[in-house]
Amino acid sequence: MNLTDVTVSRTIPAPAEQIFDMWLNPKGPGGPWFGAARLIFNPQVDGLFYSLVVFEGKNHPHYGRFVKIDRPKQIEHTWVSEGTKGVESTVSVTFEPRGDDTEVTIHHSGVPDDEVGRKHKDGWGWILEMLAQGMAARRAAARK
């Protein structure tokens, strides 16, 4: 099976520490764990996760293990799903300060080089959009 990498980036108007913490908060809108129908989540090095996402009436389980947690710079974990055809891939999320903003980059390596594998780029782009919206809502609530 041929494998490929996908990368998406977005600049979010918030400090890296806040975005990093939101990413690891399963109750915070914007992280990849938010809204899971079922979640087992142990965000520490060698900690495991299981996230069941229900989309269009179909179950989509995701599994992995945290490899690196370096607050507020990087989170790295493995990723196994139907979309990776059961192959363990690696997701690296970096948080780079850009003045008052943060550039968040998701690099997903080792996904199948096919239509489903490349769709991870759309999925991670959607997660970044939800993360930006979650941070905007948090900022608006703090102003009240």
Image (cartoon, rainbow, N blue to C red):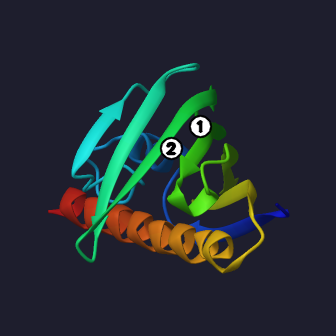
User: Quick check: can you spot residue 112?
Assistant: yes
Marks 1,2: beta carbons within 8 A: yes
Badge 2 crowding class, 10 Å Cα cut-off, few under 14, some 14 to 19, many 20 or more, is many
Q: Quadrant of the C terminus?
A: bottom left
Q: Quadrant of the N terminus?
A: bottom right
SS at circle 1: loop
Residue type of the residue flagged with mark 1: Pro
Task: Find residue 123 and report its horizontal and vertical position in percent.
Answer: 52, 71
**Residue topped by disc 1:** 72
Question: What separation in Å lies between label 1 and label 2 (alpha carbons)?
Answer: 6 Å
Judging depth in this view, the residue of 22 and 90 nearest the camera is 90
Determine whether, in the image, residue 114 is placed left or right of residue 100.
right
Determine whether, in the image, residue 83 is placed left or right of residue 35.
right
SS at circle 2: helix
Sequence order check, earlier mark of 1 and 2: 2
Residue at the image position 60 percent from the left and 76 percent from the top: 119
Residue at the image position 85 percent from the left and 64 percent from the top: 2
Badge 1 crowding class, 10 Å Cα cut-off, few under 14, some 14 to 19, many 20 or more, is some
Task: Find residue 70 and report its horizontal and vertical position in percent.
Answer: 64, 29
Judging depth in this view, the residue of 111 and 85 nearest the camera is 85
Judging depth in this view, the residue of 21 and 49 nearest the camera is 49
User: Quick check: can you spot residue 98?
Assistant: no
Task: Find residue 98 and report its horizontal and vertical position in percent.
Answer: 69, 60
- Looking at the rendered structure, the number of numbered marks drawn on it comes to 2
Task: Find residue 65 and report its horizontal and vertical position in percent.
Answer: 56, 30
Residue type of the residue flagged with mark 2: Phe
Above/below status of 32 relative to 65: below
Residue at the image position 22 percent from the left and 62 percent from the top: 143
**Residue topped by disc 2:** 20
Residue situated furthest right in the rendering: 2
